[in-house]
Image (tube, rainbow, N blue to C red):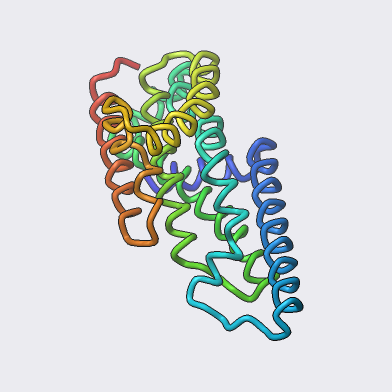
Amino acid sequence: MWVIAKHESLQLLKSVKSILVLLFLLGCAYAGVSVTELLKSSFDMMNGNDLSVSASEAMIHSIGLSFAIFIFGPLFAFILTHDAMNRDIEQRTMRFLITKTERKKIVLGKVIGHLLFWFTILTLSYLLIFILSGYFSFFAFFQSFSFISVFVGLALLLSLIIKRPIFSSFISILLGIALPILSLWAMISEKWVFSIFKYVSPYNYLKDDNMLFLVNFAFTAVYIGLAIYLFRKKDV
């Protein structure tokens, strides 16, 4: 399981798409800190004194990165994970893996590898914020990671439901664009249909500064459990 996780994580870190995602997030982190510092300096000059350091200042400095993750994170997660399982099934390498380890451990190895990748690039992005501003928001970091983990789990499940990577790629792009729009719409809509969708959306558990974001890890666990069940029944 850990060998598979290490392999998946390293393969992602070396891919061009992943490098572009990392550069984009680093750019958003840099831009967010720059704008925040500029606004803070302007406010200080207008008031003739320095702003006192508040408990939420670390989160304010990470707002640019958080915005990028919440808007583009689902698309990035789907693009990078949509073929995690069906690629190996199509290339017949999955049969070799099955002879070496349990199906459950294959799924867990895949998802752990992808989550390790995201943990790494989020750490690098928030470290850049710390270097530039001197603040590191652990709360914002784990909020972002819990949010991304939901779409990693969903994309992994998608890669088992859809047999061909070329089709899962197309559908993942549609979902990566549609889900944020539908989720944000559901949060402001008063129609009961959207209110139901709101409670299964990871966005709903990020709107307040509390520990409700942990619910997103439960969603991730459900998707992984469904993927394990489906893979056990699947003929490869």
Q: Residue furthest bottom?
A: 49
Q: Residue 16, how many percent across, how many down?
A: 69, 37
Question: At 33% across and 47% down in the image, what residue appears?
Answer: 216
Q: Residue 99, how many percent across, how many down?
A: 33, 29
In front of the other: 31 or 228: 31
Q: Quadrant of residue 33?
A: bottom right
In front of the other: 15 or 213: 213
State whether residue 121 is above or below residue 50: above
Q: Residue furthest front?
A: 47
Question: At 35% across and 35% down in the image, what residue appears?
Answer: 107
Left or right: 115, with 76 as reference point: left
Question: At 40% across and 51% down in the image, what residue appears?
Answer: 207
State whether residue 33 is above or below residue 198: below
In front of the other: 171 or 71: 71
Please indicate, yes or no, whether residue 224 appears anywhere in the rendered image: no
Q: Quadrant of residue 60?
A: bottom right
Looking at the image, how many numbered discs can be counted on the residues?
Answer: 0
| Quadrant in which the C terminus appears | top left
| Quadrant in which the N terminus appears | top left
State whether residue 223 is above or below residue 34: above
Please indicate, yes or no, whether residue 198 appears anywhere in the rendered image: yes
Question: At 33% across and 32% down in the image, what residue appears?
Answer: 190
Q: Residue 115, how many percent across, how many down?
A: 45, 47
